[in-house]
Amino acid sequence: MKIGVKIIRLSSVDSTNNYVANLVKVGKIDSGTVVLADEQSDGKGQRGAVWLSSAGENLTFSFYLENVNLSVEKQFTLTQLVSLSLIHLLSRLGVDARIKWPNDIVVKNRKIAGVLIENQLAGSEIKSSIVGVGLNVNQVIFKGLNATSLFSESGLQRTPIDVLMSFIDAFNEKKLEFGYRSEIKEDYLKNVYQFQEMANYQDSNGKFTGKIIDVLTSGKLVIQVEHEIREYDLKEIKFL
């Protein structure tokens, strides 16, 4: 599960996740390979969303994992691991960030990074995973988006490839630290944005006030609304 054994750098690509997927199809990629692009023309976000990033200013990459050793019902563990690796990296760089469920990384509710994981299944097990990451490094203008960057938060310019190498170290350290043990959930919850805080949300029935109290093994968000406990999947709830 170690990543960074090989790094492929591209000047431009539609999506690093797509590029990795194509290499997987023809059997020309090893587990742990990282694909970095200076520019993405069609970067992917969760559930069909688009990741917008200025060319050359940010970090956009994907990595490939085989033998993930997770059942389908526990696949959210990988999301937790990647999200915590980003939190760990940002902390090292002097930025206090949180995980906005399920896998957006925010600084005071401004998005600084995002994760997209595409799993290939073999029965009830995950055969392999393609993990895509976008991290705003030097960009300062986001055209109305509620976003921020390492430069905006720290005032320091950084080279995206250097930030990538730091992420690789952070991920490999976190993987060894947790080894997919139960402690990863505890660490994830401690870093969840608005965890155990009263906040405003919206679902298919309208706006409401509630408190995040848990995230299940399946990845579902659990919110307490007065004396009622509600569970939400991706795209079923909006943070207000």
Image (tube, grey):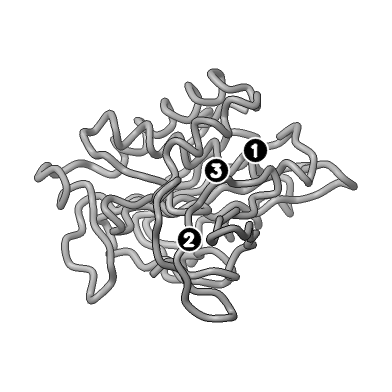
Residue 123 to residue 203: above or below: above
| Residue at image mark 2 | 210
Query: Residue 87's image quarter?
Result: top left
- Residue 28: x and y in percent read 67, 44
Residue furthest left as drawn = 155
Q: Nearer the viewer, residue 207 or 26?
A: 207
Disc 3 target residue: 63
Q: Which one is earlier in the sequence, the residue at label 2 or at label 3?
A: 3
Q: Nearer the viewer, mark 1 or mark 2?
A: 2
Residue at image position (49%, 46%) is 35
Kindly identify which residue carries mark 1: 65
In the drawing, does residue 140 fall left or right of residue 40? left
Q: CA distance from mark 2 to mark 3?
A: 36 Å
Q: Position of residue 39 (x, y in %)?
A: 36, 61
Direction from residue 131 to residue 87 in the image, left or right: left
Estimate the x, y position of residue 27 in percent, counting from the top left: 73, 46
Question: CA gap, disc 1 to disc 2?
Answer: 37 Å
For marks 1 and 2, the one nearer the N-term is: 1
Q: Does the CB distance between marks 1 and 3 fall below 8 Å? A: yes
Gap between marks 1 and 3 measured at Cα: 7 Å
The amino acid at mark 2 is Gly
